[in-house]
Structure formats: C-alpha cells, structure tokens
Amino acid sequence: MTLVAALLAAVTALLALDGAGPASLFRHAYLVPVVVAALRFGALGGTIAAAAAVLLSAPFVLPEIERSGLTSEASEGLMTFAVLALVGVLSGALRTRAGRHRRRYEILVAIQRTLADAAALDVALVRVRTALVPRLRMDDLALVARDGDRLVVAGGDRVAPGSLVARVLDEGAAAFVGDAGGGCRSRRAFATPLVSGGRAIGVLAVERKGEIAAEERAALEALGAHVGLALENARLASRQRQFAAELAEKISVARRELEELDRAKSAFVAIASHELRTPLTALQGFSELLALRRLPPEEVSRLAGVMRRESKRLGRIVSDLLDLSRIERGLEPALCRVPLAVEPTIAATVDVLRQGTATHPIAIECEPSLPKVAADPDALERVLTNLISNAIKYSPIGSVVRVKARALGGAVAIEVADSGRGIPAEALSRIFEPYYRVPDAVDAARGTGIGLTVVKALVEAHGGAVRVDSAPALGTRVTVVLPASQGA
Ligand code: ADP
C-alpha cells in the first residue's frame, strides 16, 4: 500500500514540476501505481488506486477546463481519467478472478493428495473435511457419503430426517437456506450433492454467518462434483487394490496346489512303477520256473494261481491308470451300461478276491429281490474290487470285511465296511483327490492313491454318489448309491 501511495505521490510531483498541465506525458505514469495496486489487492485495490490517481490529477485538468473550456488538452486529461478507472477496475477484477481460480485449484490438489493413499471411507471423509475447512472459510462444514446402506458423516453427528442434507441426498440437487437463524447477523446454509456417475453419493454442506454469494455457491457445486468423483476414484482404487491382493492370494494358493500336485505326481510315478514291477517280477520269475523246471502238478497249479492273481492285479492297476488319465483330461469314463443284477456281481468280485487272499473273511449280505442297476459290469466290478481291496489292506488280518446291498428309493446302496484303522477326520475330504494317500497309512499297505479317485469318477458317471463314514481305530464304511435300472 505504501509503495502505491509513494508512486502516486511521485507521479503527482512530476506532473507539478513538469508544468505542462493536463497534457503532460507524466499523467500516463499514473498507470503504474494503479496496475500495481490492482495486481496486489485485486478489484478493490485497483479501483481505489484509480480513484486516487484521478483525484490527484484533477487539479491539473479541471482548472484548465474552467479557464479555457473543453480544449483538446483538457479532453486528453479527461480521457486519462477514464483509462485509469478502466485499467484499475479491469485489471483488479482479473486479478481477483485469477486468485479465485488459484484457490480452487489448490483445493482440488489438496483433495487429491488427501485421497492418494488407501483409507477407509470414514477416514477419507474426515481427511477431506480437514483439508476443506481452512480453505473454504466457512463457520461450519460437513461431509456425508453413502457407504452401501449406511451413511458416513464427517463434521456432524448424524443426518436428521427432513434436514437440508437429507433433502439434498434424496433429490440430488443443491439447496440454499437464506436464513438459518443466528440472531442479528443471519446464518446461511448451503448444501450441494457429491456427484459420481450422475448420482448423488453424498453431500457437502456449509454454514456461514453472513452472505454465501451466488458465485461462491456455484463454485461449491463444482467442488461437490469434484469431491464426489475423487471419492469414487479412491473407492475404485481401493477395490482394485483389494482385488489385486485377492488375486495374488488365489494365484499363490493355486501355485502351492500345483506344486503339491507335482510332488504327488512324482511320488505317484515312483509308487506306480513299484506297483507294476512287483506283479511283473512275480510273473517273470514263476513263468521262468515253469518253463525251465519240471514240477509236480500241485506245485504247477499253485504257481499258476499266483500268476493269475498277479496278472489280475496288474490289469487292475492299468485299468485305474487309464481311467485316471481320462479323468485328468476332463473326460468321463467310457461306459457300456446295461441292466445289471447287483448280488451276482458282488458275489463274482468277492470270489476273485477270495482266491487272491485268505487273510480276511468277506461276508456278503444282500436284501432279497434287489432291483437291477443301470451299470457297466466291468466298471462296477472295478468299483467293488477297489473298495473291498482297500477294506482288506487297511484292516487287521482276520477281521471281517462286510459287503451289503439294499434298496434305497429308486436306487441300490452298496456298502463295504471294515473294522480297520479308519481315516482321520482331517483326511476325509482329501481321499478322493488323485494321488492322495493318508500319511499314516502309507506304511500300512501298498497303494497308488488313485483307487478312490477312479471309484468316485466311475460312480458319478453312472449318476450315483459315494460316501465315506469312518472313525479312526474303529473302521470305515464306504457307501455307493447307484440308480436302479428303469426296466428293472
Ligand atoms: P490307495 O492305493 O493308497 O489305497 P485309494 O485312492 O484307494 O489309494 O485310497 C486313498 C487313501 O484313503 C488310502 O491311501 C488310505 O489312506 C485311505 N483309505 C481308503 N480306504 C480306506 C479304508 N477302508 N480304511 C482306511 N483307510 C482307507
């Protein structure tokens, strides 16, 4: 201000010293303090400085008009008044507008910074409010945002039904209250929606003792739209981060599962080769014996029995492997379904197994007049062989293995029960996985870990279901339910 006053005084002194009256060229120098004041203090400063310049230069112009009328020199002096007033007001107004724009820009930058790092909506809203309060120069400021069904409020306790904020939230349009009480100097309230995607996701409400001009309200509306967008962006960014974290977790779980599967497969290759080699070695050894030696007939028939048993075992393992390879390629097992009587199939399978092992008595209990099932005879035989072999493998020598069949609605339930080691509860959900073997049971019996996988796939391909009930140390019961044949 002092600088402006000094400049005005200096220009006036120059005019006086020059003595050229209203036409003195020094009169243009008044533009300097007027522009300085406008740039420094805005519209008001520019106007006051222009008025002061006009008043100070008037003693040089007005006496001339009085003396000689409106001479060309006096007209120039009057023209200078007009130019000074125009420059002062215009440059001041431009300066004021530029200042307003800068403040708005600073507010937007502050909001962006506030929402840059991940935070819950409650925290983000409080941060935005803290950034806005000193910049908007209001007496009170509240922010409300929808979060699903609830409303998050910063700067107010709650949103009262029927209040200005509730109205703006419902209608999605800004509202102004010109007199919100407040004694001699009335309070004014203004609320504007926080807009995102064309809908109100919240409200920015302000209150001030004194005027909230139309221009300021328009700026607040624009700010509301910006805050809405910024909040939505922050919400999207946070959702994206959460999604990325979930994806990373899923990928790592999938990788772990793949690694585990890979390990299981390697173990399986080792076990399967061993499982295949054992019967092969027996077959090789006994066949050589038969070819090279002359043996008594009873010994020949004993060796032939062993060879038959081992070749059956080999055949079973190969069938399971072929089925597994189809399952792993996402194909259903190849089936040729016919109406099949359950009891004779059970009896035939048990017969074959009895020839192979005398270690466990196998009891068959079938309800009379069971309906036939629609099944592939070879597949049902493999299911039964797998289940009965497991019952034998995982139960102590001498204990009874029971195979039962009963009618169950439009189906037949076949149960294979043993009183063996049982399966721990935590392993029950995994026994149908390919290559899975209960760790404790690995040393108890030989196996590949694919038998139950094949059983499940075969039974499900028949439209049936498998269920396992087991209690450690008490025994295991596997129930297979197969739909009855329609024509049965
Ligand atoms: P395996 O060739 O190892 O027997 P399966 O797929 O037939 O493979 O069975 C998977 C695992 O389930 C077995 O390794 C064993 O630990 C467990 N299991 C299956 N049947 C029984 C049973 N009757 N009693 C106890 N454990 C069983």
Image (cartoon, helix red, strand yellow):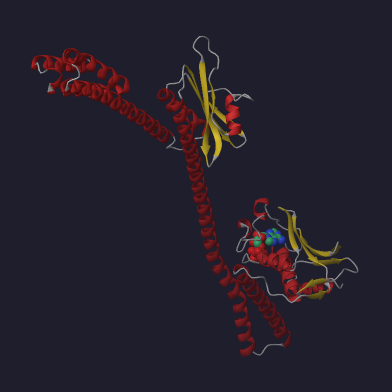
Quarter of the displayed picture in which ligand 1 can be seen: bottom right
Residue 445 visible somewhere in the drawing: no
Q: Is residue 105 left or right of residue 278?
A: left
Q: Residue at x 28, y 17 (%)?
A: 48
Residue 374 visible somewhere in the drawing: yes
In the picture as drawn, the residue positioned furthest to the top comes out as 184
Q: Which quarter of the image is occupied by the N terminus?
A: top left
Residue 106 in the image: state x and y as whole percent: 37, 31
Q: Which quarter of the image is occupied by the C terminus?
A: bottom right
In the picture as drawn, the residue positioned furthest to the front comes out as 69
- Relative to 191, residue 412 above or below: below
Residue 298 in the image: state x and y as whole percent: 74, 84
Question: Depth check: 217 or 116 in front?
Answer: 217
Residue 384 in the image: state x and y as whole percent: 75, 69
Question: Depth check: 342 or 461 in front?
Answer: 461
- Relative to 212, residue 377 above or below: below
Q: Is residue 165 left or right of residue 349?
A: left
Please state the total of marks drawn on the protein image: 0
Indicate the quadrant where residue 97 lies.
top left
Residue 31 in the image: state x and y as whole percent: 20, 24
- Relative to 247, residue 184 above or below: above
Question: Depth check: 246 or 26 in front?
Answer: 26
Question: Depth check: 103 or 35 in front?
Answer: 35
In the picture as drawn, the residue positioned furthest to the left comes out as 18
Indicate the quadrant where residue 445 lies.
bottom right
